[in-house]
Image (cartoon, rainbow, N blue to C red):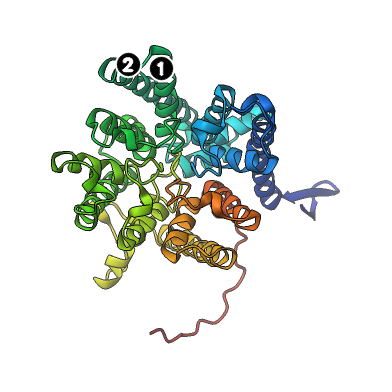
Amino acid sequence: MVSRSFRRRLMGTQTIQLESPEKRRVFNNFLRVGLGFGVFLVLGTILLSIPLASSSGEGTNVFDAFFTAVSAICVTGLVVVDTQTHWSFFGEVVILLLVLVGGLGYMIGIGLVLWIFGRSFGIRDRHLMRLYYGAPSLGEGLRFMRSLAIYALGVQVLGTLVLLFVFSVVHGMPFNRAIWWAVFHAVSAFNCAGFNITGHDMLLFASKPEVLITMGLLVFAGSVGSAAVILSLFNRRIKMSLQVKLILYSAVGLITCASLLFALFEWNNPGTLATVGVADRPVLTFFQTVTWTSGFSAINLNFLNDETKLFSSVLMLIGGAAGTPAGGIKLATVAVLLVGVVGFFRGQDEVAPFGRRISKTAIRQATAITLIFLGLFFLVTFLLILLSDFKFSNILYEAASALGTVGWSTGITSGFNSSGRVILIAAMLLGRFLPIILVLIMFRQHSRETFRVQRDSIRLG
């Protein structure tokens, strides 16, 4: 923290100390976010490593417990041990609680962390929440956060009730098993976690549209719907905001294009879509594409064609909407970047989709975030290639899944050595917390330029 002394003459000499808090403030925000989730991560690792958490009654390797805890709190779903067979009921409860912390806690994380540390909401905190979550105005930040919590809990309760009816009545499961499956999968789906306790992911329900549609809608509500619905409620007296339009249009466009590509590449693949009848394939295709942020799958991903793995990796890197449990670059970020590119080719100095102007600063920020994610994706993929001998397309798929906090995998996660798993852990943590860190950095106050250096030209292309 830098201190500066100024002298002013006011009936004598007075010395005033002015401090520049921006660097310390950003560091403190980093520290609060890290400590807030770090406490739960350590606690989850300890609980998962004790004998009570294992179905065999023996303690789990600490590193495997740590990997599972990171995957749960980062709502990723990558696992090194099978969730259904390895963990006891207690272990499954711990995983579900970590998913709630990483999902719901992340959605309202800034307010939650400040509350844990006894902080009141100042002007900068409210503005930071508005910047990240997209709250309509400075004064509505707290109400907006509360609405997010109500929306999230309400959707998960509704999803649990629907799945309970489907599992117990439609499929005739014992009630105790049906209610636990309903709670676990509803929470995991809404929070885009991808953890399942069926033992075979959603393969058991590949031809059951009542399960796939419910799960798909829960994932959509968690990765896209929360921001769009809440913002629409706040803006019900005025026209829908540009952010909501960008999120909804990009989400619908993404799902539509991905569904068409997935059907084109996999329709007759005997290991994926062709495992069910022709009548069930459209719903299965919808499920596989609408869960691009969660990691649930009703097919064996190891049998995907390489071209499907490639465009699916792109989907995972894009991710969902900002302020939701979904990871990735974020829908609005990619939409802003695409709008800027279109405006460039049209020769427009400023771009204004839907009649709303986007600032050049927002386009620069979207470009920076995208380049950072792509750079990290390249680095993670490169390191995993060095540390393993798996097929390149599978490694690419795994790297995108970890960095995008999705959880799709061709089954190679447990095949990595300790070094490879460390890379995956780092990728999941970066994919989960890098967006909010970048927001904190971009929100940081910058010193004003006292003079401008001479402008020069650079040849491009």
Q: What element carries label 2?
A: helix
In this rendered view, identify the residue nearer to me: 380 or 418: 418
Outermost residue toward the left in this view: 279
Local crowd size for mark 2, using a 10 Å CA cut-off: few (<14), some (14–19), many (≥20): some
Q: Quadrant of residue 407?
A: top left
Location of residue 367 in the rendering, given as x and y in whole percent from the top left corner: 43, 63
Q: Which residue is drawn at 57% across and 75% down?
A: 452
Q: Are discs 1 and 2 less than 8 Å apart at CB?
A: yes
* Residue topped by disc 2: 168
Q: Is mark 1 on a helix, strand or loop?
A: helix
Location of residue 352 in the rendering, given as x and y in whole percent from the top left corner: 28, 57
Amino acid, disc 2? Ser
In this rendered view, identify the residue nearer to me: 318 or 289: 289
Of labels 1 and 2, earlier in sequence is 2
Outermost residue toward the top in this view: 175
Is residue 4 placed above or below 180 in the rendered structure? Answer: below
* Residue topped by disc 1: 179
Is residue 430 placed above or below 368 in the rendered structure? Answer: above
Q: Which residue is drawn at 34% across and 54% down?
A: 303
Amino acid, disc 1? Ile
Q: Which residue is drawn at 60% across and 62% down?
A: 448
Outermost residue toward the front in this view: 56
Location of residue 428 in the rendering, given as x and y in whole percent from the top left corner: 55, 49
In this rendered view, identify the residue nearer to me: 439 or 20: 439
